[in-house]
Image (cartoon, grey):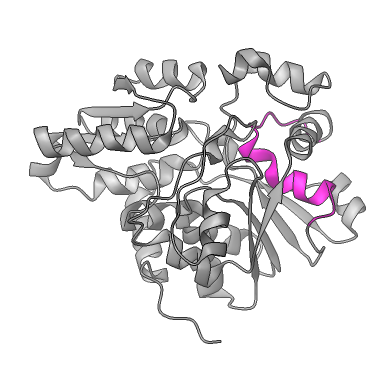
Amino acid sequence: MSRQPAPVSLGDIRAASARIAGRVLRTSMAESAALTELTGVPVHLKLEHHQTTGSFKLRGATNAVLSLTADERALGVVAASTGNHGRALADAARAEGVVATICMSKLVPKNKVSEIRRLGAEVRIIGRSQDEAQDAVDRLVAEKGMVMVPPFDHPAVIAGQGTLGLEIMEQLPDVVTVLVPLSGGGLAAGVAAAVKGLNPKARVIGLTMERGAAMKVSLDAGQPVQVEELPSLADSLGGGIGLDNRLTFAMCGDLLDEVILLSEEEIAAGMRHAYSVEREIVEGAGAVGIAALLSGRVRPEGPIVAILSGRNVDMSLHRRIINGAVSLSKEDAA
């Protein structure tokens, strides 16, 4: 079946790459000897968790802020976030002298909230879901005229995240399978648009957690739907995709070859392997690629690239996982 032109094109992603050059890191890629031996095909890790703010989100946030007009910058920016987008937007806004307000639910880990405050953004904690946080954003847009920079369903954000896909294709042109964390779909849509724009035969697989997999449930239903948000080791993958989703739902449905769900135990195993074998500290969302390979849920067609998307994990939680825990404690989930 032929694909429709993506709302965010390869040209848009290339323009974003030029725009953010020098403001975000071009992260490295390393082959994993252990995962290569396990799968029988070359496995490379895209070390995006080494990004300045600890996650890929800086790409999209920076591209979005740099795309604003002078009048829009004067109004300030606002966003809902599960943590990493808020941190990235706070950093990008501060670099340009723009006021930022970040709305988050009570499920966002405290370490991510405190870091956003440290970067100078105003933080508002609302309810226990991303949808409730988004309602607060909508009120600020209506009442104060602030400019909303969504965490995923925005062309400049998607194009910015897609620059990661460009780097993958430049670093490993013969890649066959790309494993990408999937939440609201900004990263997955952008990476898939870049990768398939350069090699339509490459596979791009979205990976998410079983607990509250909003995009997977929506794709299965054929339309955006709400799901209950539940605490997860992959907290960055939580939240809905928005019932009025304009871009990422369609792009993920068209561009992703498969979506795979992972249990909390599998995500914990991915975090543990990243630390003990690869010597990398990653949060749950960043470990889903490794988790999928360890669990055998991905058909090993290589070369494979697994994106390690973020490292902003509470270190006390990380220590518990490394020492054998397989899920959040009651304290973590509170």
Left or right relative to 293: residue 93: left
Left or right relative to 204: residue 112: left
Q: How many numbered dots are placed on residues in this image?
A: 0
Residue at screen point 40% across, 34% down: 81
Residue 7, quarter of picture: bottom left
Q: Position of residue 263 (x, y in %)?
A: 74, 41
Query: In the rendered structure, does residue 281 fall within the stretch colored magenta?
Result: yes
Residue at screen point 62% across, 32% down: 232
Classify the position of the N terminus by image quarter. bottom right
Q: Position of residue 302 (x, y in %)?
A: 78, 65
Left or right relative to 119: residue 53: right
Q: Position of residue 101 (x, y in %)?
A: 26, 27
Residue 70 visible in image: yes
Residue 145 visible in image: no
- From the viewer's perspective, is residue 175 above or below residue 233? below
- From the viewer's perspective, is residue 152 above or below residue 144? below
Query: In the rendered structure, does residue 189 fall within the stretch colored magenta?
Result: no
Left or right relative to 285: residue 327: right
Classify the position of the C terminus by image quarter. top right
Q: Where does the magenta region start and end?
A: 278-297
- From the viewer's perspective, is residue 246 above or below residue 266? below
Q: Position of residue 190 (x, y in %)?
A: 47, 59
128 or 317: nearer the viewer: 128
Residue at the outermost bottom position: 1
Residue 321, quarter of picture: top right
208 or 280: nearer the viewer: 208
313 or 229: nearer the viewer: 229
